[in-house]
Amino acid sequence: MKWFESADNQRKFLIYYCLIAGLSFFSTLFLPHIGEEAVYSLGTLEMLSHKQYLVHTLLNHPYSRPPFYIWLIAAVTKIIGWQQVLLAARLVVALTTLLTSYLLFLFTQKIFKQQILALFTVAIYLSGDLLFRRGWLAYADPTFSLFVFISIACLWLALDSKRYNFLIYAILATTAAFLTKALTVYVFYAVAALVFLWRHPNGKWLLTPYSIFLHILGIALPSIWLIAINPADQGMLNDILLTAGTPATASQHIAHIFIQPLHLIGLFAPLSLIAIYLAIRKRIVYQDLPKNIMIMLLLIVFINYLPYWIAIKGEDPRYILPLYPFFAILLANLIIAGKGLKISCYWLLVTLALKLLAGCWGFYYFQEHNRSNYQQLAQTILKTVKNYPIYSNDVEFTGLSTVAELEILQGPNYPTIGLPPAISQNAYLISVKPIQPGYQLFKHYPLKRTDLYLLCKGKAC
């Protein structure tokens, strides 16, 4: 603990922490498919196979998600090979997380003019949920979050400097975020813009003719995509409405509202707990904080977090991943103002040790003993079936992971596996139900969390 008392040692530790934490993401890249990762593996393989680069498909049908993340995975897959598509997807996420960390460092140092604060902010960002799971898992959210962060950060810098080049970068970043995942980027961005319009000293600069023109252009770009290029992605609107309008009882809503903040604290533990401890003990000197900057950050975070706090389906951490950098900035300022950097360095060291243990051994042990081996299952299926088409109607993680492993094993020269057509003669069907119209049971595969069935039709039986 005494070693952390020196400011120079704290700075050195934070540098080493950020480097090792970033490298630790690569320890988990070789795990099998987890959760919904197969959505992106299949989307990439189908894109490469069908050469339909404007549409993200799943089981050969439009998935109503833009394809930017799939483009990135496909580019890496082209380099390292078809069989390494999952590795390619995780590499994109790990590198995206590291790029966000670097840009967060530059942005924080630019705004606050303190290197130690910028380093500590990145260290907080590379801890908790992001360090153990969200920073390497092959979902589109980290890439989406990178562009959301760039858009808000560049908007802030544009206002500070009154330079339109930063505003152009912000508009381009919102477009890239939309093409990565969802329309919600415009909510994050609009909230930030309204906060800046109200609180930033140069807020009225956003109302200049050229600024208004650039923002109209920024709104036009996704409209053109949804109307003229890929109308199938309009399904994103339904997803937003479904998330916001999920039915729930009054007691469920009340429980959700009370539990959600605790969930948020857990995502940034143990640093969030240190900040709470310092606040309770009244050790934070709020006068040392830049008042207007902190108010703007709080408003951006709180207003954007509010819908996910209220919505019953808003508990998944990936929905608020774009807010992680701003949470990190707030926590870093509070802890430093409360003279808590020394104890934070100690707990960051403990956190890093746990991550290295989990990344090198824990995740693999858990996967082996608590998850099914979909690669082995795919090999078994391929040895069992005859030379007839294979379809799947299972859109949950079990069926999708199995189909992804099947396509990886078969290689690019085989047709990708899709949903069963309305009329088929001789075929196999992967299903989580043993009975499907027109098919009969062929094989039953008991798995650790559920069962999977291979059904057959016609000569395939």
Image: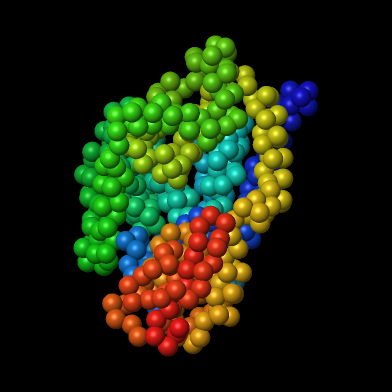
The scheme the figure's colours follow is rainbow
Outermost top residue: 282
Left or right, 432 with reference to 333: left
Relative image position of residue 161 (x, y in whole percent): 39, 38
Work out whether residue 58 or residue 369 is closer to the camera in this orientation and state it: 369
Q: Position of residue 10 (x, y in %)?
A: 70, 30
Q: Give me the residue at 56% from left, 52% from top.
A: 136
> How many numbered circles does the render carry?
0
Q: Give residue 190's quadrant in the image.
A: top left
> Which residue is pictured at 30% across the width and 51% down the height?
239
The answer to which image quadrant residue 391 occupies is bottom left
Question: From where the camera sits, is residue 80 visible?
Answer: yes
Q: Nearer the viewer, residue 405 or 140?
A: 405
What residue sits 43% from the left and 31% below the top? 260
The reply to whether residue 76 is in sight is no
| Residue 166 locus on image (x, y percent) | 39, 46
Q: Residue at x 38, y 55 (%)?
A: 181
Quadrant location, the C terminus:
bottom left
Residue 222 locus on image (x, y percent): 27, 57
What quarter of the picture does the N terminus occupy? top right
In terms of depth relative to the viewer, which is nearer, 244 or 421?
A: 421
Quarter-of-image position of residue 374: bottom right
State left or right for residue 207 relative to residue 148. left
> Depth check: 175 or 282 in front?
282
**Is 347 on the left or on the right of 295, as rendered?**
right
